[in-house]
C-alpha cells in the first residue's frame, strides 16, 4: 500500500493515479484536517465489488471456497476446450 500526503498527491496527481493503476495497490492519501482517502484503480474497485457480490450468498461463498480448496489440493481435472467443443462427454465433480 502506498501512502502519500494530500499536498504531494495534488502536486503530482497524474503520476499518483498512474502508479496506483500500474501497481494494483491502494494509495492512501493522508490529510491533516480530515479523514484519509483510499485511491484504487477502477479495475481493482470493480474486482472487489464483484468478489463481495459473489460471496454475499453464504451458499455461493461456501461453493467458491470449496472450489478454491479443491484447486489448492490438486483435486481438479483439466479438460481441453476443443474436447468440449467436439461434444465429448465430460464427467463433472471428479
Image (spheres, rainbow, N blue to C red):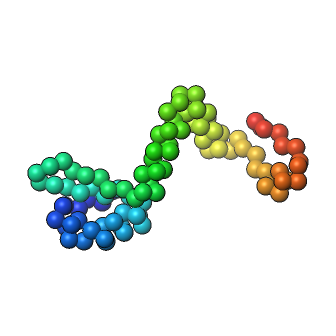
Between 10 and 5, the one nearer to me in the picture: 10
Q: Compared to 21, does 75 lie above or below?
A: above
Which corner quadrant of the image does residue 21 belong to?
bottom left
**Residue visible at 83% across and 57% down?**
82
| Quadrant (top left, top right, bottom left, bottom right) of the C terminus | top right
**Picture quarter containing residue 62?**
top right
Q: Report x, y in % for residue 16.
A: 30, 67
Quadrant in the picture for residue 27? bottom left
| Extreme-left residue of the structure | 33
Q: Residue at x 20, y 71 (%)?
A: 11
Q: Residue 17 location, x and y as percent?
A: 33, 66
- Is 30 left or right of 38, judged from the image as shown? left
**Which residue is at 23% across, 57% downward?**
29
Q: Is residue 16 above or below residue 77?
A: below
Which quadrant holds the N terminus? bottom left
Instruction: Please state if 80 lies on the left or on the right of 17 as rendered.
Output: right
Amino acid at each position: 500500500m502506498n501512502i502519500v500526503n494530500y499536498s504531494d498527491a495534488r502536486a503530482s496527481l497524474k503520476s499518483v493515479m498512474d502508479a496506483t493503476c500500474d501497481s494494483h495497490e491502494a494509495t492512501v492519501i493522508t490529510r491533516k484536517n480530515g479523514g484519509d482517502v483510499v485511491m484504487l484503480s477502477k479495475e481493482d474497485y470493480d474486482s472487489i465489488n464483484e468478489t463481495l457480490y459473489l460471496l454475499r450468498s453464504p451458499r455461493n461463498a461456501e461453493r467458491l471456497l470449496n472450489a478454491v480448496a479443491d484447486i489448492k489440493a490438486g483435486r481438479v481435472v483439466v479438460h481441453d476446450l476443443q474436447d468440449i467443443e467436439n461434444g465429448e462427454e465430460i464427467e463433472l465433480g471428479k
